Image: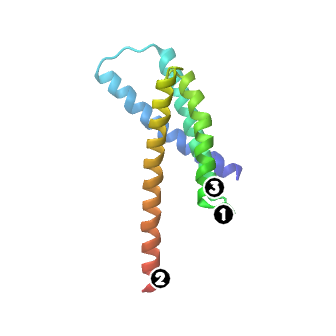
Amino acid sequence: MVVELARRSLLGLGFTAILTFAALTAMMIQDLQVPVSIIWKNMLGSMVMAIYFGGASLLFDIEEWSPLKQTSIHFVLSIILWLPLAVWMEWLPLRLYPVLAGLGSFIVVYLIFWVSFFLYFKRLEKEMNNSMKK
């Protein structure tokens, strides 16, 4: 379990590294000058989120839990981590409308990922059932 948690967290960090490199490349192409402290703070926030989402994917491996329970707990934990982090990182100002807009955006992105995975696993299920019939 600990090894799998570490593996998934490192996988999340790998995705963060790729996205950070892409963002820095775009900044370099546009010749943007940003203080290192801002880059450092944003990288830290991205890394924290990557480790969380990598590790939190283990919730979906708990077979005793229903998919609804897995998703609900994952969603609530994600919001509990993301919102304070987004405010601390200054991704969101601590005011009502920006926080509500940020939460709305987070929910939309979460739903897009959820629907994508749902459709993927439904297709996989159909393919497996079809191969069993042959």
Amino acid beneath label 2: Met
Foreground disc of the pair 3, 2: 3
3D distance between C-alphas at marks 3 and 1: 11 Å
Viewer-side residue, 14 vs 120: 120
Q: In which quarter of the image is residue 45?
A: top right
x and y, in percent, of residue 115 in the image: 44, 54
Q: Dot 3: what SS?
A: helix
Give the residue pinned by disc 3.
69
Which residue is painted at 45% across and 30% down in the image?
Answer: 101
Taking the view exactly as shown, the residue that stands out farthest to the bottom is 134
Identify residue type, mark 1: Glu
| Residue designated by label 2 | 132
Q: In the rendered structure, are the residues bearing label 1 and label 2 in contact, judged by CB atoms less than 8 Å apart?
A: no
Pointer 3 and pointer 1: residues touching (CB < 8 Å)? no
Q: Where is residue 17 in the image (x, y as percent from the top left)?
A: 47, 35
Q: Is residue 22 left or right of residue 78?
A: left
Image position of 70 with respect to 10: above or below: below
Do tag 3 and tag 2 residues touch (Cβ < 8 Å)?
A: no
Quadrant of the image for the C terminus? Answer: bottom left
- Along the line of sight, which residue is nearer the eye, 51 or 25? 51
Identify the residue at horizontal 39%, vertical 26% (top origin): 24
SS type, badge 2: helix
Q: Distance between the residues labelled 3 and 2?
A: 29 Å
Residue density around tag 3, few if under 14, some if 14–19, many if 20 or more, within 10 Å: some
Residue 98, position in %: x, y?
47, 25
Q: Is residue 9 visible?
A: no
Disc 2 crowd, CA 10 A, few/some/many (<14, 14-19, 20+): few
Identify residue for label 1. Answer: 63
